[in-house]
Amino acid sequence: MRIMLVDDEPFVLKLLARQLHAAGQQDITACESAFAALERLGGAEPPVDLIFCDLQMPDMDGAEFLRHLADRAYTGSLILVSGESERILRTAEKLAQAHRLRVLGALAKPVEPAQLRRLLAQCTPGGAAPAGLATGGPIEVAEFAAAIAAGELENHYQPKIDLASGRVCGVETLVRWRHPEHGLIFPDRFIALAEENGLIDALTAVVLDAALAQGERWRAAGIDLSIAINVSMANLTSLDFLERAFHSFANSRFPLDGLVFEVTESRLMANPLAALEILTRLRLRNIGLSIDDFGTGHSSLAQLRDVPFNELKLDRSFIHGAAHDGALRAIAEGSTLMARQLGMKSVAEGIEDEDDWEFVRAMGCDQAQGYFIARPMPGDRIPDRISGWTCR
Ligand code: C2E
Ligand code: CA
Ligand code: CA
């Protein structure tokens, strides 16, 4: 692996180089400034696989260096190193990610050998980002419309745990597109497309109908779960969506008080009056309303004031790692407390490890969801997963 170190302090460079040698690395270039690093990167052949970058440097600081790396389309990995506070390290990490650089992590000085080894183990030389499932080109609107009509969308369900009892109390419905050639395609690639091209009502209708039917099957098998589905703000611009939903409810025996609509505002409310009417009428039917991704984008305090939400869903960006990050912890705890004072349920998503799990339990959150508990899965796998969880 070709490694480059960038730090203005010669002593730090020497120490880090020694630690890397001890970890089995041979090909190390040390640079005492970001300028020197950029110069060397220019002609580096074969290209550098991994850069360790200090943030605080006199001539060009780490943040500016990141921008130059992005401009040069640097495809290797990056580890940020700093004696600054944890918060500055996190901010720099976000900045690097926003530049679409591959950040393996951040190290506080003095660097701990064990932590260094852990990050090194994550680095795969060559630089190419791991190819995801079906990373084909852009999706054609007509192709996607046809896929909805052809029944190629399928629901997966991710369990949610009631933290007081430790039981699986519900699921969140997450849509996938089973493409005949490319396999499973995830919603991040087509939700915005559907919203922008008038297909989101059709998508949500298919998801809702399948979820209601699945809910009935679980109940027939003696499994009583609440079901959340994701509703886009774009669904709430006209009453068509509401009429379609009422029609679905009329054709289903699934109890409406077991249904939760998670609403994310990915853009400004186009028609606030229509949205407010639809949400109020859903709530009057006893359907739960959850403010999704709370604290990000436009899912804000103003919405809490104006919309009859009865559940607050804390975004995973505030949960995972909160046990070790004072700022995240303050946001997560503050939001949970606010939910309680407003008489709302709180749900934490993004529980990825045991530390997250212990953190949300101690925080007094009502429900938890995340990879540590279970990944989203097809509906027929849920019964087994529930028995498995109960044992665990
Ligand atoms: P979301 O509502 O925030 O849903 C949670 C996403 O986080 C899901 O991604 C889920 O698989 C993922 N996730 C769950 N646990 C963890 C965890 O512990 N760590 C991490 N890093 N991620 C976790 P997915 O299925 O790719 O969905 C992405 C987004 O697409 C959803 O975000 C939601 O906004 C949207 N979406 C999904 N299905 C629908 C739908 O039927 N309608 C609409 N309008 N949007 C949908
Ligand atoms: Ca959601
Ligand atoms: Ca979220």
Image: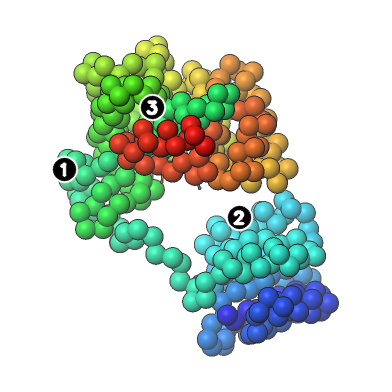
Q: Badge 1, how many Cα within 10 Å: few under 14, some, many 20+?
A: few
Q: Secondary structure at mark 3?
A: strand
Q: Residue at x 66, y 68 (%)?
A: 117
Mark closest to the chain's N terminus, 2 or 3: 2
Q: Secondary structure at mark 1?
A: loop
Name the image quarter holding the N terminus.
Answer: bottom right
Up the image or down, 240 lies above or below 136; here it is above
Q: Badge 2, how many Cα within 10 Å: few under 14, some, many 20+?
A: some
Q: Is mark 1 within 8 Å of ligand 1?
A: no
In this rendering, does residue 46 appear at all? yes
Q: Residue at x 55, y 45 (%)?
A: 352
Q: Secondary structure at mark 2?
A: helix
The residue closer to the viewer here, 296 or 349, is: 349
Up the image or down, 254 lies above or below 48; here it is above
Q: Position of residue 159 (x, y in %)?
A: 44, 34
Q: Residue at x 27, y 26 (%)?
A: 217
In this rendering, does residue 13 appear at all? no
Compared across the picture, whether 256 is left or right of 101 comes to left
Q: CA distance from mark 3 to mark 1?
A: 24 Å
- Residue farthest to the right, as pictured: 11
Up the image or down, 79 lies above or below 27; here it is above
Q: Residue at x 60, y 38 (%)?
A: 357
Q: Nearer the viewer, mark 1 or mark 2?
A: 1
**Amino acid tagged 2:** Lys
**Amino acid tagged 1:** Ala
- Residue farthest to the top, as pictured: 284
Residue placed under numbered mark 1 in the picture: 150
